[in-house]
Amino acid sequence: MNIANTIKEKKTSPLAEARALALPSRQEMLTRAPSVQYFWDNNKKRLSQAWLEWEEETKADNIQNNNKLTAKTQLSDSILDEKLRAAVNNAWQQPSTETAVSDLWQEAAPGVYKAQFFDPTRFVELRDYLQQAAASNIPLRPPYGIVLNRNGAKLDPRSEGYLAAPSFQDFYQQLLDKYMRPIARLLFPEVVGFDTQTFGFSIQWQAGMDTSLRLHTDASAVTMNVNMNLPDEKFTGSEIDFYDPATGKFTRLSFEPGTAMIHRGNVAHAAQPITSGERSNIVLWLYGMQIPQNDTKVAIAAEQRWTVPTTAKDNVAPF
């Protein structure tokens, strides 16, 4: 094959075609213009193929440049907190040991639990991967919906314009299936059966741009919000206020690098304005055909918690 043909093929590859697309404007997306839905529907296959090509190209470039942070090594649960990873692995082998998992989660506000989720010394690998993805010039749909946030991306395959890179999707599903769902079932047993569907997005708060989020509840059975700031990435403000209807009071909590907060979707919460720096998070939801209407504890066998649902996934994104 001559050079001219190689160049021609590269120009017409899905990756090149995706990079040539003009992303709908912020205003068009906020007003849900018909052209926005058409854009994502018309380019769904092209974007999926582009992410596959991008991942292969990125991996090859990293290997050629002797970069150890290849797409393959970046995205595994080795970047999670060692204690959490060990306890979860043991519970999958022996569900009776699951108390070692719940012991790592402290109730920081009524119905809100907090724990170290990522290893702050390791999840730079995930951040590097996401930064490479953001710089790929492949259109991604920001998490417009419950929040008008212009950075970040949709993560779940049911979402239009999601981050469809195969290794990321493997990692994302591992977070949900191996970690979040059994942890949610352990802390909130009543969600079993309401946790078969998934949803996720990354989000960024930054002073002077997207700064806060009003009081709201989530259309989820359970929400997990995981901070992705590195230890040297400081910010001020951006605390989360959780409302307790029993007392009418708020509890204000802050994120530290790699920590996660998990709560039922019906817990009202708000993000305070960020006053300096940036805060980056991944938000994961579990939900089903319905959302539990009460917080009544139910008796669930440990073996039932440590399973992956066989319910077929739908194609409906919450927003």
Image (tube, rainbow, N blue to C red):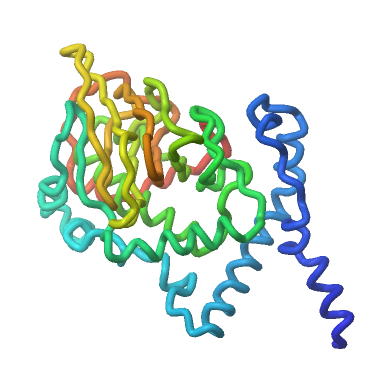
The residue located at (62%, 60%) in the rendering is 136
The residue located at (34%, 36%) in the rendering is 223
Outermost residue toward the bottom?
1
* Residue 177 visible from this viewpoint: no
Image x and y of residue 131, in percent: 51, 59
The residue located at (30%, 31%) in the rendering is 240
Indicate whether 146 appears above or below 43. Answer: above
Indicate whether 203 appears above or below 246. Answer: below
Between 265 and 195, the one lying in front of the other is: 265
Q: Residue 94 falls in which quadrant of the image?
A: bottom left
The answer to whether 254 appears left or right of 280 in the picture is left
The residue located at (42%, 47%) in the rendering is 310
Image x and y of residue 75, in percent: 41, 65
The count of marks equals 0
The answer to whether 160 appears left or right of 24 in the picture is left
Between 275 and 119, the one lying in front of the other is: 275
- Quarter of the picture containing the N terminus is bottom right
- Quarter of the picture containing the C terminus is top right
Between 188 and 110, the one lying in front of the other is: 110
The answer to whether 194 appears left or right of 45 in the picture is left
Image x and y of residue 215, in percent: 37, 20
* Residue 63 visible from this viewpoint: yes
Indicate whether 118 appears above or below 5. Answer: above
Image x and y of residue 178, in percent: 32, 54
Indicate whether 240 appears above or below 43. Answer: above
